[in-house]
Amino acid sequence: MRAARCTRYGPPDGLEVAELDDPAPGPGEVLVRVHAAAVNFPDVLLISNRYQVPAPLPFTPGSEFAGVVEALGPDVAGPAVGTPVAGAVLTGAFAERVVVPVAGLRPVPDGLDMVHAAAFHVTYATAYHSLVTVGQGTAGEWTAVLGAAGGVGSATVDIATRLGMRVVAAASSAERLAVARKLGAEAGVDYVHEDLKTRVRELTGGEGAHLVIDPVGGDHAEAALRALRRGGRFVTVGYADGKIPRIPLNLVLLKDAVVRGFEIRMLRQYAPDAVAAGDRALARMVRDGMRPLVSRVHPLAEVAAALTDVAERRTTGKVVIEMR
């Protein structure tokens, strides 16, 4: 099979596509023929050895995929060979085949093709649980979303709007804010040219946001925390800026704010009921027409270019690799 390979840590241009032996599923595992795999920012961090969990060299990057079951490991009862599935792994998805624990697979929601199925679950589950399970957002609340045109950000704007929240999108350009508005954002802040705290407070009638979802981090995190109203909630989801923020705790005290973190692998482990409820809610939204925003689709041979675009934030929504 063909697979992208990281043989040394560094930027995406160090990746190569190589021929590897087909993997075989072991006990509790399933072999999936991958049709499409989505690029996520943690993939960029993994190949540069900057992620919270290191990946030993050499490895195949890629964490989110959709495909068809090709073989079952010993004692695995299903899903049946030929079943369309989507799944997530830490590494291994940028390949024509991947072995994954059967518990890590889920059916492809009705209405999604393979490209959109690959781009769906990680970002949309992250968005849903950040907003609802962790953020406890409700209809009518002002919700500020940082990085609102990126993968997680665009999904968060989409879901928040569908749940009746009033979204203030924050992004780095007018063009990216236009993407967020098409997804339902009520207002926008260009945080390169505008003061984030001041504009969010102005746009929310002077009170500030009830909820902030932050997949960006860096210097924008503190400004977004300052944009909360008293008793507001701040959910930190990731650090696409590349810098983990240091928050003055006196801001939390003075605002009586709640600051929580969200990491999807931990939720699956410790809150399976919440995960199941989220999957049902997302499936209903897909039936109602929700689709992930996919801005670019690359063949496997262009995997380095795809990761470079994501690393340099030249894209909106999701970038997908097709195994062609």
Image (cartoon, grey):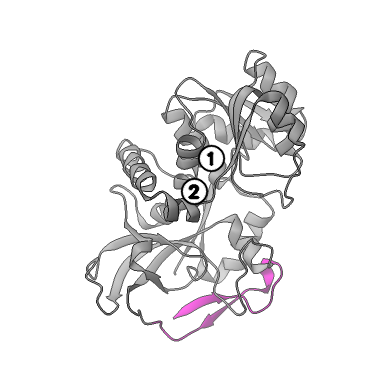
Q: Relative to 84, is 128 above or below?
A: above
Question: Any magenta on residue 16?
Answer: yes
Q: Position of residue 57 (x, y in %)?
A: 62, 79
Question: Any magenta on residue 219?
Answer: no
Q: Say which residue label 2 marks.
A: 123
Please provide the residue range marked out in magenta.
1-23
The kind of residue on which mark 2 rests is Thr
Tell me the residue at 37%/69% (across/down): 101
Give the SS element for disc 1. helix
Q: Relative to 103, is 131 above or below?
A: above
Specify whether 214 is left or right of 198.
Answer: left
Tell me the residue at 56%/36% (across/down): 179
The answer to whether the residues at label 2 and label 1 have Cβ atoms under 8 Å apart is yes
Q: Position of residue 271 (x, y in %)?
A: 41, 48
Task: Decide which of 51, 259 is in the foreground and name it.
Answer: 259
Instruction: Say if residue 190 shows up in the picture.
Output: no
Give the SS element for disc 2. helix
Q: Position of residue 319 (x, y in %)?
A: 53, 54
Crowding around mark 1 (Cα neighbors within 10 Å: few <14, some 14 to 19, many 20+) is many
Q: Say which residue label 1 marks.
A: 154
Task: Decide which of 13, 285 is in the foreground and name it.
Answer: 285
Q: Position of residue 1 (x, y in %)?
A: 44, 81
Image quadrant for the C terminus? bottom left
The kind of residue on which mark 1 rests is Ser
Task: Decide which of 299, 319 is in the foreground and name it.
Answer: 319
Q: Please give the label number shown on residue 198.
A: none
Q: Residue furthest bottom?
A: 21
Tell me the residue at 32%/54% (across/down): 108
Measure the C-alpha gap from mark 2 to mark 1: 9 Å
**Front disc: 2 or 1:** 2
Q: Earlier in the sequence, mark 2 or mark 1?
A: 2
